[in-house]
Amino acid sequence: MIHIPVLQKEVIEYLNPKKNENFIDATIDGGGHTKEILKRNKPNGKVLGIELDNDIFKKLKKERIERLVLINDSYINLKKVILKYNFKPVNGILFDLGMSSWHLEESKRGFSFLKNETLDMRYDKNNKLTAEKIINNFKEEEIEKILKEYGEEKFSKRIAKEIINERKRKPIKTTFDLINIIKKAVPKEYQYRKIHFATKTFQALRIAVNDELNNLSKVLPETIDVLEKNGRLVIISFHSLEDRIVKNFLKENERKKILKILTNKPITAQREEIKRNKRSRSAKLRAAIKI
Ligand SMILES: C[S@@+](CC[C@H](N)C(=O)[O-])C[C@H]1O[C@@H](n2cnc3c(N)ncnc32)[C@H](O)[C@@H]1O
């Protein structure tokens, strides 16, 4: 299954790619947004595409897209990558955060609570931390904190306690093992709500395994150093914690007169898009221009 790009029209509107300009797609995945940029920055404009997941990187590499410099790395190495490939000037940077539909549907790494898979959840297979390690080795308080902070899970305490009880009996190996534990821990009513009772736990584990919030906080200041004057920064986030980091970063730099914010309120998907692509439901786009 191909990842359907979220807020495509809005990304193009705010990045505003023009003839011969260069862009960085810091989370390129299947290149949905990049391909639209490349239609607009002809004939000599380039895109530097960064993808952390080696399997996704290899798939896109096969497409041999012209004017795309494709790198298998983490966006936290943004400055290093730009230096190495001497990629300048940078007229715009896009972050479309989180996981790809491919992770949920095809990776077999336990991102989805609908499939029985091993509890991995890594984008980068060289990462030493997996969801299984967190679940089976972290202390009860640490697990509770992850579920509470990264998942905003109100039953974090009860779920963490049940995980510890169960793992004393036998190691917790699969997504379905974990779902059964969550089911035991949460009240019955919680199991019949619109959002699946495992959603928040799965989100929290994925964020913790991939250190997603710290990575975002680390990379944002680097974007300012590498953007040209009038360069545009566009960020799509998918949950409130990410959005808060982005919002505070933009506001702080607007106060310092380094950035001008282009989106007073975050841009969200229209009803039509949400109907076509459920993933767009929680997307928030914020954009700014370097002064
Ligand atoms: C939501 S998808 C991007 C979708 C893409 N914009 C499109 O429309 O086709 C996010 C991608 O970022 C990648 N990713 C996550 N963390 C990353 C990081 N630290 N550095 C680079 N890529 C990362 C994920 O593997 C995933 O493929």
Image (tube, rainbow, N blue to C red):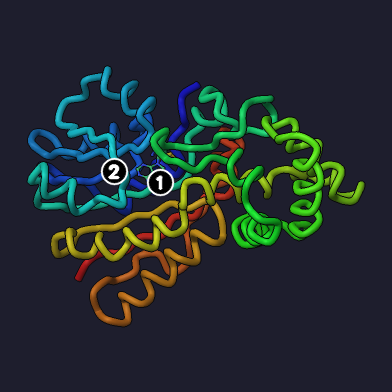
Secondary structure of the residue carrying tag 1 is strand
Q: Which residue is mark 1?
A: 96
Indicate yes or no: mark 1 CB to ligand 1 under 8 Å: yes
Ligand 1 quadrant in view? top left
Q: Position of residue 175 (x, y in %)?
A: 68, 32
**Mark 2 neighbour class, 10 Å CA radius: few under 14, some 14 to 19, many 20 or more:** many
Q: Residue at x 23, y 64 (%)?
A: 224
Going from N to C along the chain, the mark reached first, 1 or 2, is 2
Q: Residue at x 65, y 44 (%)?
A: 135
Q: Residue at x 37, y 29 (%)?
A: 30
Q: Is residue 139 above or below residue 116?
A: below
Q: Residue furthest top?
A: 62
Secondary structure of the residue carrying tag 2 is strand
Whether tag 1 and tag 2 are in contact, CB under 8 A, the answer is yes
- Residue 25 is labelled as 2
Q: Quadrant of residue 128?
A: top left
Q: Position of residue 127 (x, y in %)?
A: 42, 40
